[in-house]
Image (cartoon, grey):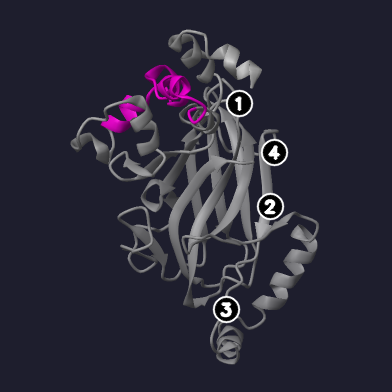
Amino acid sequence: MAGISSIGVLPEDCISAILSLTTPSDAGKLALVSSMFRSAAESDVVWGRFLPENYEEIVAASELSGEAPLRSKREAFFRLCSPILVDEGKKSFELEKLSGKVIYMLSARELSITWSSDPLCWTWKSHPQSTFPEVVELRTVSWLEINGKIRTKTLSPNTKYGAYLLFKISERAYGLELMPAQLSLQLFPINQPNTNNYNNNHNNSEAYVWLHHKHHDQNNQSNLESLLYGNRRERATKFIQNHVQNKEFRVLNQREDGWLEVELGEFFTTQNDQQLHMSFMETKGFQLKSGLLIQGIQIRPKH
């Protein structure tokens, strides 16, 4: 307490400068110490350091642009701790409340999904649990490929991040369990136009996941899959034994908001801007697949 008492004799602007070097969580706790700390901790000097440099541009390009102006940087910070839609509703932006780190989510409309413009293959629809106006549901394809990309300069520097595909699996789904889906994440320098040279890029990760889902009538589902796939299951088993048996397999995570997620990979941001490419694909089985509902890809800090 002696240290805190000593700091208390400093001018308020000095205390604000000190608090700005902490975290939003620390600033909130120190605001409870005394009225002097509270006044300093609520200043624009402190909360300006916790906001991204371009936060005004983000607000101007978001759904907040038509609302009343934010009265302080502290108010702006806490408003941005809830997701806001940006880029014509194709992305969401938010700040992690405890650290102030940037979180982005790319909507399904912002992703490159093979055949997503064909209504026989994919259906665009609204969903009450989605952050975005639209999600996309897989009707039937044999080639499932979803890609997303984002510049790392839009994220917080010097931070460990993870990228996660958010989705649901419907009760009527089929064909998703026959072959594991491939997950990959790659970082490329901005000045490297060729992003197809995966093997020569050391900033990459690759793993697989099984899209297991439950059916109320497992017997009928097994009979349907036997009818549809025939000997494809045997071929799938051989492919797994020969190609992915020793690869990393990730598990699905059930989120509190009702969506499933799987990690596509992790990476570390630096001061240098890079292009992040993320993908989810199942293109080896060639069986028909259906029943996958895609919300988007979230990029958030890992702890």
Q: Which one is earlier in the sequence, the residue at label 3 or at label 4? A: 4
Q: Secondary structure at mark 2?
A: strand
Magenta region includes residue 87: no
Q: Alpha-carbon distance for marks 2 and 4?
A: 14 Å
Q: How many marks?
A: 4
Q: Secondary structure at mark 4?
A: loop
Q: Secondary structure at mark 1?
A: loop
* Residue 18 x/y as whole percent: 54, 15
Residue 207's tag is: 2
Q: Nearer the viewer, mark 1 or mark 4?
A: 1
Residue 199's tag is: 4
Amino acid at circle 2: Ala
Depth check, front residue: 141 or 46: 46
Q: Are marks 3 and 1 in contact (CB under 8 Å)?
A: no
Residue indicated by mark 1:
158
**Is residue 237 visible from the viewing direction of this image?**
yes
Q: Are marks 3 and 2 in contact (CB under 8 Å)?
A: no
Q: Which one is earlier in the sequence, the residue at label 3 or at label 1? A: 1
Residue indicated by mark 3:
214
The N terminus sits in image quarter? top right
- Judged left or right of residue 93, residue 224 is right
**Is residue 197 visible from the viewing direction of this image?**
no
Q: Alpha-carbon distance for marks 3 and 1?
A: 40 Å
Amino acid at circle 3: Lys
Amino acid at circle 4: Asn
Q: Alpha-carbon distance for marks 2 and 1?
A: 24 Å
Q: Which residues are magenta?
A: 31-60
- Judged left or right of residue 16, residue 5 is right
